[in-house]
Image (cartoon, rainbow, N blue to C red):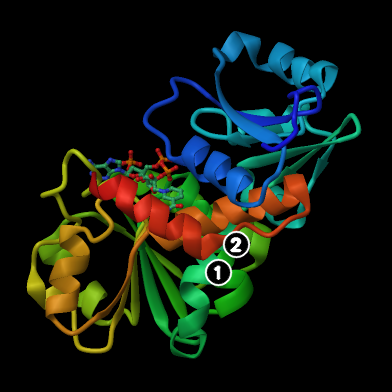
Amino acid sequence: MKNSFYANTKVVGLIGHPLKQTYSPFIHNVAFQFKNLDYIYLPFDVISDNLAAALKGVMALGIEGLNVTIPYKEKIIKYLDELSEESAIIGAVNTVVNDQGILKGYNTDVYGIMESLMPFKDEITGSKVCVIGAGGASRAVIYTLIRYFKPEEITLINRTVQRADSLQNYFSEKMLYNNFKTKDLFPPELIGTFQSSKLIINSTPIGMFPDVHDTPTELKESFYQGQLVFDMVYNPTETVFLKLAEKQGAKIIGGLKMLVYQAAKSFELWTGEEMPTEKISRALELLIKE
Ligand code: NAP
């Protein structure tokens, strides 16, 4: 930063435990440089017993904002002063803004999912969709689908089917949407479900580096020409799951766009500035390929 003596540098960061490999510091610090903003993004690995104290520290030190990751996305809510509409319904926060001592929670994964799926809005609206996974990312995707795409039916598929059942009950109550089915993740039995879905979404870590040969289904009959297949995994940028779907003529959507756009929304909430998303995507692709 030109002519800066670092007296006014603003601090944002990521809170979680344990902090595994994350691209967020890279994305934000490179974006601050591109935009010539006097900000720094730091990782804060905080144990559970210290979460409340850490948030008091955020206010005392004037830290501008945080991203929140596992295991605090839900737990942090009770320490916040305000919640955005989407984070209140989803029940999870991935971004905190310190607005002059008032801590506000948001879920910017919704924005990343919107950016990824909006180009296909007409195809998704009123169609059958299936979501593999029942964790935090699945919650954000279910909210986005119901709120913005109104699918005819959502099938929730999970290794632990009870978690899919509780998500179904949660969203039926919160969003008054009742067209759910739930299924175990047993690929041969799922072929019919996959084939009748216009959109399949993987919101599990299956296929994520280093387990890059894993895939939620290895059966090519799961996919068809013109189907939409969205994998939230971003490393590798094209998973085995997506490669298989593409070979069958499906239109594929990788997780990198979601990663960049959820970060862009956090960036905007903290700085009021737009993130240069094209440049960041290119930088990130190079980094992931290294
Ligand atoms: P989470 O809350 O821990 O949920 C993980 C989900 O994946 C659960 O449904 C779990 O099933 C399932 N799962 C985990 N390992 C599995 C395996 N080996 N076989 C079958 N199912 C498995 O995690 P999350 O926060 O939802 O994140 C899920 C994935 O989405 C991660 O890979 C994360 O990197 C990715 N993500 C990407 C973005 C992006 O911007 N592209 C944003 C958010 C998340 P059980 O219930 O049976 O345990």
Tag 2 secondary structure: helix
Q: Is residue 231 visible?
A: yes
The image quadrant where one finds ligand 1 is top left
Apparent side of residue 63 relative to residue 76 in the rendered image (left or right):
right
* For the residues bearing labels 2 and 1, Cβ distance under 8 angstroms: yes
Read off the residue under disc 2. Answer: 111
Asked whether 251 or 190 is in front, the reply is: 251
* Image quadrant in which the N terminus is located: top right
| Spatial CA span between label 2 and label 1 | 5 Å
Mark sitting on residue 253: none
Apparent side of residue 256 relative to residue 148 in the rendered image (left or right):
left
Tag 1 secondary structure: helix
Residue type indicated by callout 2: Tyr
Q: Position of residue 195 (x, y in %)?
A: 22, 80
15 w.r.t. 85: above or below: above
Asked whether 94 or 259 is in front, the reply is: 259
Q: Residue at x 74, y 20 (%)?
A: 55
255 w.r.t. 228: above or below: above
Residue type indicated by callout 1: Met
Rendering quarter of residue 197: bottom left
Read off the residue under disc 1. Answer: 114
Q: Residue at x 18, y 76 (%)?
A: 246
